[in-house]
Image (cartoon, rainbow, N blue to C red):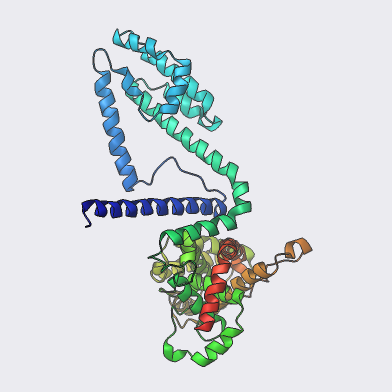
Amino acid sequence: MDGPQDGANVSDSSEDSQRKTAKIVSHMALAHELLMDDSFKLQTELPQNSLERQVRDVVHKAFWDKLQEELNQKPPNILSLLLPYQNSLKTHINEMLDLDLIKQQADHGILDISKLAQSIVGFLSKMCAPARDEQAKKILLNEDIVDLFREVFSLIDAMKVDMANFQLQTIKPHLMQQSVEYERKKFKDYLQSNPATFDSFLPSLGGLMSTKVWLKRAAEVATGVGFRAAAEVSAEAVDTTDFKQKLQDADLIDVLVHGYLGIIFGEAGWPFPETLIMDEFRLAEMRWSVRRTTLIAAVLLVTLNTIGQQLASDAAYLANLKEVLYILLDGVPEGDFPSALPGVYEQTVRETEKLLQERGLNKLTSQQKDLLKGQTEGITSSDHTVFNLITTRTYDFMFNSIKRRFLQKGSRESGQSTQPSTPQGLTSVNTELSEITGRFSRVVGHNLAVFVPFYEDLLTEIKGS
């Protein structure tokens, strides 16, 4: 007969599984961030409004209040300064300080706490990185003993993070060599630890349902059956027979590149695969960057078409207007771009008239302003010819850039360039677009290397269904 103990065993097993899964994911996420972000570092400060910071602040306040209370005792309970978990620090301090003597002095009320603090800070100064020297020196400027030791522990926390970052940078070259195999193995471990979630993915491919939907949607675009931006295609719009015939000849690289770009250009609801979950926020930022860049390129093109050729060849004007527009749209969420367009129009007119005056050229006419206003404020509408053209050319530019990178791995050695020429209308934002494309290519290139066996099997399954 099953009893309470059986239920407890099930609960313990579930908790162990959750801990194992969390450990796998944290290791995989850390390794992935090291590879994708050259400037990645562990931070000493937690986010301002995070739950972790709130809990830490409450616990720290309780500790320092308790310390103040104990130091106010006669004699003070100085041993409370040594926290139970500071074992390694205790070992080092025991090597240089006679704790028995310190206890005797504390018991008799003759302990010189300032001198003790100087010894500890001096010891830490020898251990910490040079960048922490100023922080260590400022500690001794604290006259209040509680504040002094609060800064000591703050320095110790910072030193721990410095050491962790040093160790991460040390293993990074080795990790880069083994990254594909490492992430693939960790992902398989994750799938195996979550058989219910992924429908017993291994050894079959019954799981990864979002990835399968994503690939199928990308295949519809690659075969010309579906539209690039649409999140999904209605059954009526798909000629099933035609799709299956075209799908047999579909190239995996073409399918995947369309799938990756769908995340950037697709409408809300475009499928998002489980295999890219580690890059979800990174890709969201890139999507926003691409949308902002295409919007600015369209505004610049509309402006030049409206004011004629008076300033078309003025590189300084275009560079200045572009910089102003990037600043104006910085931090504006993608969904709020339409509401920001009246401000874009006003700033465009202001910058244009300013330069026209400096060049001694005629001011903008009322007709030009009205035309520019209508073209600018309606630029994100689905039927705006210029914006749609710029978006299509941006898509094609990124598609060709990424596909060339995948197919021409030896091009750098042969001296050939993997970057296609910038399409007309995008030359004004060539630098920004190339930078975004480079970052995007790095993410999807690594993703393809890690998950191509999964994608091949899933596409084979789609072709056979």
Q: With 390 as the anchor, is 269 left or right in this view?
A: left
- Point out the residue furthest to the right here: 414
Numbered-mark total = 0
Q: Is residue 141 above or below residue 322?
A: above
- Point out the residue furthest to the front here: 1
Q: Residue at x 57, y 73 (%)?
A: 456
Along the line of sight, the residue nearer the viewer: 418 or 379: 418
- Whether residue 214 is visible, yes or no, is yes
Q: Is residue 230 above or below residue 119?
A: below
Q: With 187 as the anchor, is 399 left or right in this view?
A: right
Q: Residue at x 36, y 15 (%)?
A: 113
- Whether residue 266 is visible, yes or no, is no
Residue 126 in the image, given as x and y percentages of width and height: 53, 23
Q: With 360 as the anchor, is 143 left or right in this view?
A: left
Residue 282 in the image, given as x and y percentages of width and height: 49, 60
Q: Is residue 246 above or below residue 93?
A: below
Quadrant position of residue 421: bottom right
Q: Quadrant of the N terminus?
A: bottom left
Along the line of sight, the residue nearer the viewer: 190 or 27: 190
Q: Residue at x 73, y 62 (%)?
A: 412
Quadrant position of residue 409: bottom right
Along the line of sight, the residue nearer the viewer: 379 or 370: 379
Residue 54 in the image, given as x and y percentages of width and height: 30, 43
